[in-house]
Amino acid sequence: MKQPDRPVTAAVVEHGSAQKSTGKTTIGDPAVAKVAAIAARSVPGVYSLGTGTGRALGALRDVVGANDLSQGIHVEVGETQVAVDINLVAEYGHPLTGIADQVRAAVYAAVGELVGLQVIEVNVEINDVHVPGLNDPKSTDKPRA
């Protein structure tokens, strides 16, 4: 059965020889968000991603084993470009603007290299600073007066 003629909106990719393939690759927002989140978490001084409410819900998800790696990340993915918004909590003792710059650089590199989209902007919002031992139920350190 012959398919009706329709425009091809796919790129042609060379595979070593004269063989050519056509098709469309779609990269979804969740995939881009996970790549960005992993890159952001790799930066020293990033304590966690997300707002207070998001982190509380994330803790509940962790208890039931439904971890959300892209918490605190919002992406807008176009056909060839992506914009990334990141909300994070920094660790006390690290320069906040330095953390933001390093997160931005890590996300630009990871998304550009692993996803193949042009990153047009990475907005970083540091919404809190984590102080070890202060309101931290996992820590056995006592805050100093």
Image: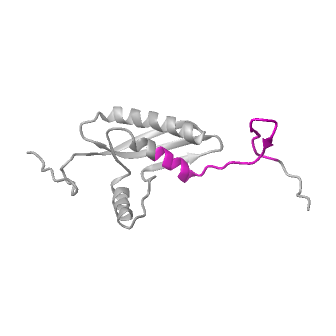
Classify residue 34 as left or right of residue 137.
Answer: right
Q: Which residues are drawn in magenta? A: 8-37
- Between 105 and 96, the residue placed more toward the observer is 105
Is 25 part of what is drawn in magenta? Answer: yes
Q: Position of residue 88 (x, y in %)?
A: 37, 46
Residue situated furthest bottom in the rendering: 64
Splitting the image into 4 quarters, where does residue 90 fall?
A: top left
Q: Is residue 64 above or below residue 36?
A: below
Q: Position of residue 60 (x, y in %)?
A: 35, 64
- Which residue is depicted at the point 89% across and 53% down? 5
- Position of the C terminus by quadrant: top left
Classify residue 89 as left or right of residue 18.
Answer: left
Splitting the image into 4 quarters, where does residue 100 fall?
A: top left
- Which residue is depicted at the point 45% across and 47% down? 37
- Between 12 and 17, the residue placed more toward the observer is 17
Colour mapping:
one colour
- Which residue is depicted at the point 91% across and 59% down? 2
Splitting the image into 4 quarters, where does residue 61 fall?
A: bottom left
Q: Position of residue 9 (x, y in %)?
A: 77, 46
- Position of the N terminus by quadrant: bottom right
Is 107 part of what is drawn in magenta? Answer: no
Classify residue 51 as left or right of residue 39.
Answer: left
Residue situated furthest front in the rendering: 17
Q: Position of residue 111 (x, y in %)?
A: 53, 40
Classify residue 8 as left or right of residue 80.
Answer: right
